Image: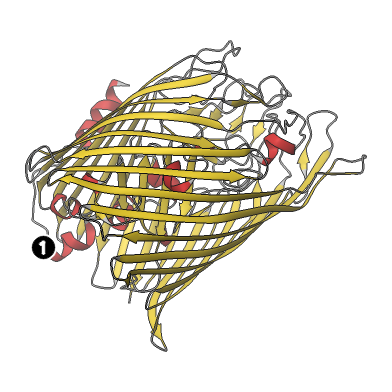
Amino acid sequence: MHKKLALLLLMLCPLPVLGAAGDADIERLMPLSLEELVEVDVSISTYSKQQMSKAPSVVSLVTAEDIRATGATNLMDVLRSVPGVYVKQNLFAFRPLVTLRGAPGNNVLLMVNGTPMRDLLWSNGIYWKGLPASIIERIEIIRGPGSALFGADASAGVINVITHTAAPIKHSEAGLRAGSFDSQAGWLRHGGSWNGLDVGLTAELSTTDGHRPTISPDRNGNTGKANYEWDNQDLRFSLAGGHWRLLADYQRQDDVGTGLNGAGVLDPLNESDSRQYGLALHYDNPGFAPDWGLNAVARYRDVKYSSGNGFITLAPPTREYLDAAERQAGLELSGLYTGLRRHALRIGGGAAWNETYGVQQINPPNPAFPIPEQSRRDLYLFLQDVWSLADDWELTAGLRYDEFNDFGSATTPRLALVWQSSERLTSKLLYGEAFRAPSYQELYFQTASNTPNPDLEPERSRTWELAFDYLASDRLKLGLNLYRFKRTDLISGAGGTFQNVGSFTVRGLELEARWQATPSLQFAGNLTLLDQDDSPGEDVNVPDEALHLRMDWAFRPRWAWDVQAHWFGRRSLPAGDPRDELGAYSLVDTTLRYRYDRNWEFAVSVRNLLDEDAHDYSSRNLPNNLPLPERNFYAEVRYGF
């Protein structure tokens, strides 16, 4: 362990610079400089652009430059380094579950270009594997409650993935990648114009056999390799003209190996699939009328899942089949009024509609079990006032009301007081309430493990935060966040039937630092500490401590080196599990990038460089837990035009 830590520290301490990289090379190979970063605007906190340090919430930003520098290939690679985030892997299909501040993934609202990706059945999709990094322009993240603007399922935070679309795409690019686990990917990004409209296109096709961990033993006492292969297609098209934007997307996952079923039994045969497509029409006009701006969006999405050749059952060992589909539609309209001195008043409302169809279970030799098709309608109104109390004081107050047809209503307020304490220090006092809506499975869907309960109440939460953002110098930026996050009416199926049970409280600290040592050398890091209570109604199993360190170094003209080190503390197991808690583990990832000329760029990456034997808790049915990928490599080439 000490040798690994010594090597880790050595890698994060660059050797004497043998040659300085040119300005153009640094600009293309390095992440944003500290000077550039502090000037970046975000819009996730209020729907309006503002500097990140002054936003009325705790916000993280990941740029396309960050993604490129770190060699990330998937959204999950990017999120792992965000303060408070822990990405757990599920035994079923090695599905990533994004936890935030000790809360499970169904309390974290994931959006793509402002469109929620949740579904009624499986939250983010039963076979969901993330998003390809090649399509992402930036990611804006609220660490904290977001229901006052975004509604349900935003108790712990909101993640908005903004993709490359028409107009912002300035350069076209094609790329190829290949590496361990027989993984290959190819992608294309193109921007242009047609009949006076801006046009954008992104596409990525990929395939992998997955890391095929050895499970020894599974729930039935068998030993074997879990099959986690999958193929992915992601196609996106966009048009922009004037105040209008049209976004269309198509995503498909084929031959998804589930590896193990939900009961922890090896399933070497199953190959499932899913597909979804969506349309969104946006209208954004900040000068719609004197003192008025107008924003509107209409959305439609269709999602389908199929178990393919079926899941293996626990006993007797037969195969079970499950098909499901869902339609989603939404309309939202909001206006920003600035006619009152020192106030920016936003008022809006909308409707969202989800409907399941074609849902059935087949368990030979029994006939198909029809599962009731259900719909959910949400009508909502929201109001927000950003009040400039003085030149250095700003108060944001917001309120949203949601009325659902299947479980009732929810009212979620927020308050944020932001004080520009000095030219370099910004202080924030934040309060917010949020809720999580009961899922279709919890309300209506009978499974082998759980009985639904149509009388469930939504989970609710309250969060207090104190945050500081300090620009210590032109080269050093620090951040400190302290919070108390309490969830009540937790929904748990531990007793067989889903019930609202008890509460869960987390007290946390998040510390961030970024140091621009030289124009060609940058360090960043963050520390997360959680104090979680011992409520029997919760079993998220995330570490109480996490540390992330990163170095980016343009050490020679046209060359750049990125090193990331991640350390995760011990994880307790759920009540009733007699095993010892999971030990701490560390992962080191590194990427070396070379820009040959204005068009060609090459990179090699190593993940889990020190070949750490790391495991995640996924189920008490796996005595030795779920092995994470061993050391793996990939190489890529990009061509810009």
The answer to whether one can see residue 526 in this image is yes
Please give left or right for residue 321 compared with residue 49 in the image.
right
Q: Nearer the viewer, residue 53 or 79?
A: 53
Q: Measured along the vertical axis of the image, is residue 523 above or below residue 29?
A: above
Q: Is residue 630 left or right of residue 560?
A: right
Relative to 303, is 615 above or below? above
Q: Nearer the viewer, residue 99 or 155?
A: 155
Instruction: Please tell me which residue lies in front, 106 or 150.
Output: 150
Q: Residue furthest front?
A: 340
Name the residue tied to disc 1.
Answer: 22
| Position in image of residue 564 (x %, y %) | 29, 40
Which of 146/587 is in front? Answer: 146
- Please provide percent x and percent y for residue 110: 48, 47
Query: SS at mark 1?
Result: loop
Quarter of the picture holding the C terminus: bottom left
Above or below, 576 relative to 446: above
- Amino acid type, residue under disc 1 in the picture: Gly
Q: Residue at x 52, y 56 (%)?
A: 350
Task: Left or right? Give the position of 498 relative to 170.
Answer: right
In percent of the image, x 42 and y 54: which residue is there? Answer: 161
**Picture coordinates of residue 201 (x, y %)?**
45, 72
* Rendered image coloring scheme: secondary structure
Dot 1 crowding, Cα within 10 Å, few <14, some 14–19, many 20+: some
Specify whether residue 87 is in view: no
Residue in view at x 23 percent, y 71 percent? 597
